[in-house]
Amino acid sequence: MTVKAPDLIPMSLGTNVKHRIDAWAKVTGQALYADDIRWPNMAYGVLVASPYPHARIVKIDLEPARTRPGVLAAIAGPGSVAPYGIMPSTQDEQAMATEKVIYLGEPVAAIAATTLDAAREAAHHILCEYEMLKPVLRPGVEQARPLIDPVHPERPQKDLFKEVDLEFGDTAEGFVHAFKTAEDTFFYQGSAHVAMEPHSALGYWTPEGRVELVTATQTPHYVQRELAVALGIDTYRIRVRTSVVGGGFGGKSELFPHEIATVLLSRACGRPVKITLSREEVFYAHRGRHPVSMKVKTAWDNNGKIQAMDFQSVLDGGAYASYGLATTYYTGALQTVSYAIPRYHFHAERWYTNKPPCGPKRGHGTTQPRALLEVHFDRVARELGIDPIELRRRNLTPPYSVTVNQLEVGSSGLQTCLDKVESLSNWHARHVRHEPDRGLGFACSTYLSGAGLPIYWNSLPHSGVRMAVNRDGSVQVFCGLTDIGQGAETMLVVLVAKALGINADRIRVHTADTATTPVDLGSYSSRVSMMAGNAVLEAAQRMHQILKDSVCAHKGVEPSQVTQDGEVFHVQGDEAVPFTQAVLWAEEDIGPLTTFGSYTPPKVLGHYKGAGVGPSPAYSFTACVADVKVDRGDGRIRVHHLWVAHDLGTPLHRPSVEGQIRGGVVMGLGEVLMERQVFNPDGRHRGPHLLGYLIPSIQDIPPITVAVVGEPDPKGPMGAKEVGQGPLNPVIPAVINAISDAVGIDLNETPVTPDNVLRALDQQSRRQRL
Amino acid sequence: MSQNLVELSVNGSIQVMWAWESDTLLHVLREVLGLTGTKNGCEAGHCGACTVWIDGIPRLACLTPVGSVVNSEITTVEGLGSWWQERHPSSHYHPIQRAFVESGAVQCGFCTPGMLMAAAALLRDVKFLTDQDILERLAGHLCRCTGYEQIVQAIRQAALTEVTEQ
């Protein structure tokens, strides 16, 4: 009998990485997400949440739950020994509420049992008594109604979380001498990340008093640091590892109550404890896009060049600080990176409200002002009689320049992005098309390739890599970065294969483990390719040097006589040396082969308060044209086509780049057409599930043409810049501008729902009758 | 009410366990049988991540009481490759798995198992696929990462593979 073995998947040889390195594990069900992991003797935990948005806690009685079958431990607030929070200057959270609950869904207790069912059942037996307070649901409502209880009465500034006022140049003068001034207001609705994987964490307080946490997070090193504050124990006692993460988008980038609760429950019951949030709980944990009310005023000269801008934003922050301090500044930071604004005034306020805390979502704080800015520019173009793309072209921030707010702009392909979508969409033919109620809209945008300053200000590297080449000829890369689905691990392999000139197949990456990987700050602010990428290149270059030195020593030749081609070192006048032989010689010479690499962004230029938000080693640029049709009968918007050009320097891995652009664009499409994290007047979420909160399905997607443009950036690893967040931003205003082009209505809020469209059409026809 | 002895046929092998008949198939697959490839995205039938085959038909495991499937053949993402191999002994893996890898249709991968089960059923049921077929049969599967385009491409590619292999 012959056994016919099935074909195995051919391994990709060569330095070219065709497919994502984690794809096979994910299509065979082998990839372990946090909720897939089970530890021996593991217990299941659940959180008990407040049913009210704003209430005093009168009593929490755990006793009735403790006697339920299977219950191992029950705990109530505060849980953390000290307030914690992601931003060092605004730490205001506890694991569980003690005196007051300030959003619906805020945890007040936690329970662990032998099974999930037992834990859920017992949770109903925890007795919670509340004294309800009127919820604060709009920013600054306490100013109008002083009798209402503030969310945070203990703060001297009450619910005003942060006020920012910055001026660069004499804005008033710019307005005095203007040929034309214009003003617009806009409300950008809040939205949620809706990663397909709900948050999940496994915690274990070991008998030796150490803490093991495996969690779905974007920032394991920050979680470790915050957890040390929350638990009041030394950081080195805590090990945080990231499981395979099922999407982040900003929603898993700080410490969450359930992560602390797993550890506390574990300490209480002596077993490992897993807590996985339900979809509803994820909507309450939130940290999503801030709802922002904005106002912009601009001054222009007669050539359509901007002279001054005044930008104001009011952010609805929800119950806690989260990343809100950074978000507040980000609503004003990047306007100048797209457009050369000579005088700029920016004012922002962020307020606490009785809603789930807002935080960073893809485009962090820049998405909302971008929507208004681009809608506003279109309206100015119309009034000045200049083509909208041409108006932008006259005002672009030049590459390699410094903005009025002291941001150093490096390479910029924005001009090329504009040209590209202009020609792809056949922009100039749009007015000779005769289809009624159909229009084209344009917008462009800018994003960071990583924040120039870390959250915890220090001069340490933002990313570190340790690289080992083993005797077996494998290359092991250790880096604290987190692959949240964007392909960060594949990016490392791409760079190492190219830098060492070896088969990608030799490379293994080990990431996101505070015990074994050097610190990388995490997967946020589009920083990973730039920072971990540069760090891994440095480590690879050092490794290359070691190998080459050993080849020279063993062959008795000068470095100039050795060249590398693929996995072979060619020696002038001698036999070639394979990579694997070089590895053995090098280990013989110096012992186990290890190198390090790290990356620290360039120094920030500005010295004003707030100058830390906005600087980046490199900026990405995007332009988008949307082709839409408006149905005057039912108010529905049909997007026929989107053209998107993105400048990301060098694309490192084409399929991942295309995937990030498409994913970002579609998320933007969701935000402009359907997504809203909104609340009833009593403070309840309008629909904390995927039928109440709609995201784009496969049937909602128009054809999207993606163009990757730009030149290699001098600061990026092999010239690369960011791609994860930028492409979302221009989609929202491009669609709104296209609607305006199609039917002549000016919409001033998101999402653009059919009823908003009908209302605007109705107002338009009434105005026309007058 | 008490637990019953439940016999299930999963990925071609018989599994016997004590379970409540009202337990969801998702719970039994993940928590009892350890088949965690099937994902829990919402527990409410909204996202499609928990899709498995029940007698070859893609169904939501989170809405299926285990008592209703005792006489059925259940296939999960872990069994998709061997289901294919039984019919096409030359490969361990279903062409749709390979196509997802090659088309860049996988990002975070959490929706992927459900997508694969829906797509594999579609490929089996419809000989000459149109894009409309794909959009209809995958409408109940939410993906937040990819923007769907590369998933559609993967299904088109797998359709070609299947045709050429037969």
Image (cartoon, helix red, strand yellow):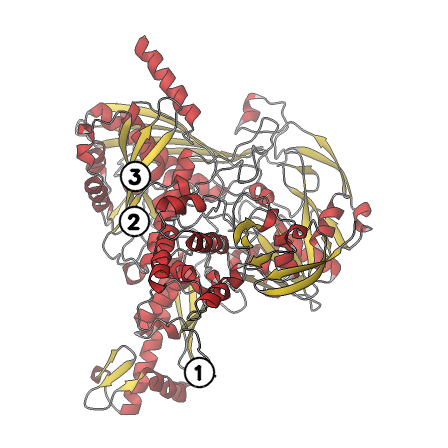
Position of residue A101 in the picture relative to residue A161 (left or right): right
Residue tagged by mark 1? A592
Residue at 43% across, 59% down: A459
Q: In terms of image quadrants, where is residue A226?
A: bottom right
Q: Characterize the local packing of mark 2: few (<14), some (14-19) or many (20 or more) Cα atoms within 10 angstroms.
A: many
> Which comes before the other along the chain, label 3 or label 1?
1
Looking at the rendered structure, the secondary structure element under dot 2 is: strand
The amino acid marked with disc number 2 is Glu
Q: Distance between the residues labelled 3 and 1?
A: 55 Å
> Which comes before the other along the chain, label 2 or label 3?
2
Task: Let me know if residue A276 appears in the view.
Answer: yes
Q: How far apart are marks 2 and 3 (CA)?
A: 34 Å
Question: Foreground: A593 or A748?
Answer: A748
Of circles 2 and 1, the one toward us is 1
Residue farthest to the top, as pictured? A770
Question: Foreground: A587 or A191?
Answer: A191
Residues marked 2 and 3, same chain: yes
Residue at 25% across, 39% down: A340
Q: Distance between the residues labelled 2 and 1?
A: 41 Å
Q: Residue A408 carries which label?
A: 2
Residue at 28% across, 82% down: A568
Position of residue A143 in the picture relative to residue A40 (left or right): left
